[in-house]
Amino acid sequence: MDGTEGTPRRIAAAFAAVCLAAGVGAVTVAVVAGPGPGLAGYVSESGITDSGYAAAYQIGIFSVAAALLLLAGALPAGLRAASGLLGVGAVATVVSGAVTCSEGCPLPPFEAATVADLVHGGASIVGAGAVVLAMLALLFAPAADRGLRRIAAYGAALALPVAGVVALALLLVGRGALLGLSERVLLAVAAVWGLVTAGYLAVRSFTADGPSIPARAGSNVSRR
């Protein structure tokens, strides 16, 4: 990776980490300080119109979407599948933040849902699922280096079982402590993975822009 390629990717990775940390912080404040039902409810309930922390929630969600888009741009050019999945996750996250659910964020098959509830819930599921799939895409991508694959392996190992619990709880149990807790764990794993990946890309790009290229150039000259 030369300087012209590495610098924009390094900047994108650094900004991705900042946006993700700020977004997660804002959403956490909205969830903890808001009047929601605690672990028995969804994170999205902090963003309903009647919530006093709806603005903080939406700002946080849009910051997370920006972080996913920046992270997609920070990945090396050969990792198009992972970048595309992160881009899908960013778009779905924007839709999730823009379309708020009604009180309780009801979802079928256990509750009657409005169109907005379905759009919001579907976008949230697609966004989280795209991030988990991006982990798998990096894990099995030949173009990914060992560091990216290792981070993705840890992330996927934690996220996949929890995602399975979320899916089963949505279909078989419905709204409650199991679903609320597993949703929070899944989001936390995705956030930590994103932060670690962004930090790794920023540091790796900085190293790649350093003395390694002149050293190779000097070695070629010495051979001549």
Image (cartoon, grey):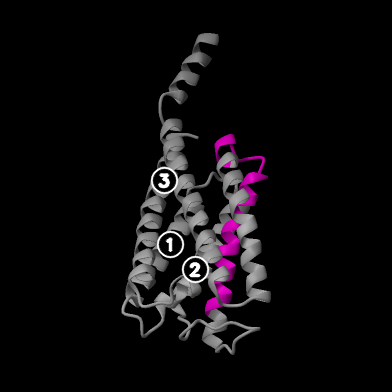
In the rendered structure, are the residues bearing label 1 and label 3 in contact, judged by CB atoms less than 8 Å apart?
no
In primary-sequence order, the first of circles 1 and 3 is 3
In primary-sequence order, the first of circles 1 and 2 is 1
Q: Which residue is at a point 68% across and 45% down the rendered structure image?
A: 140
Q: Is residue 78 visible?
A: no
Helix, strand or loop at mark 1? helix
| Residues at marks 1 and 2, CA–CA distance in whole angstroms | 8 Å
The answer to which image quadrant residue 127 occupies is: bottom right
| Residues at marks 1 and 3, CA–CA distance in whole angstroms | 20 Å
Amino acid, disc 2: Thr
The relative height of residue 76 versus residue 2 in the rendered view (above or below) is below
Amino acid, disc 1: Val
In the picture provided, is 101 more to the left or to the right than 174?
left
Disc on res. 64: 1
Amino acid, disc 3: Pro
| Residues at marks 2 and 3, CA–CA distance in whole angstroms | 24 Å
In the picture provided, is 174 more to the left or to the right than 65?
right
The relative height of residue 86 versus residue 199 in the rendered view (above or below) is below
Disc on res. 93: 2
- Mark 1, mark 3: which one is toward the viewer? 1
Q: Which residue is mark 3?
A: 8
The relative height of residue 145 versus residue 223 in the rendered view (above or below) is below
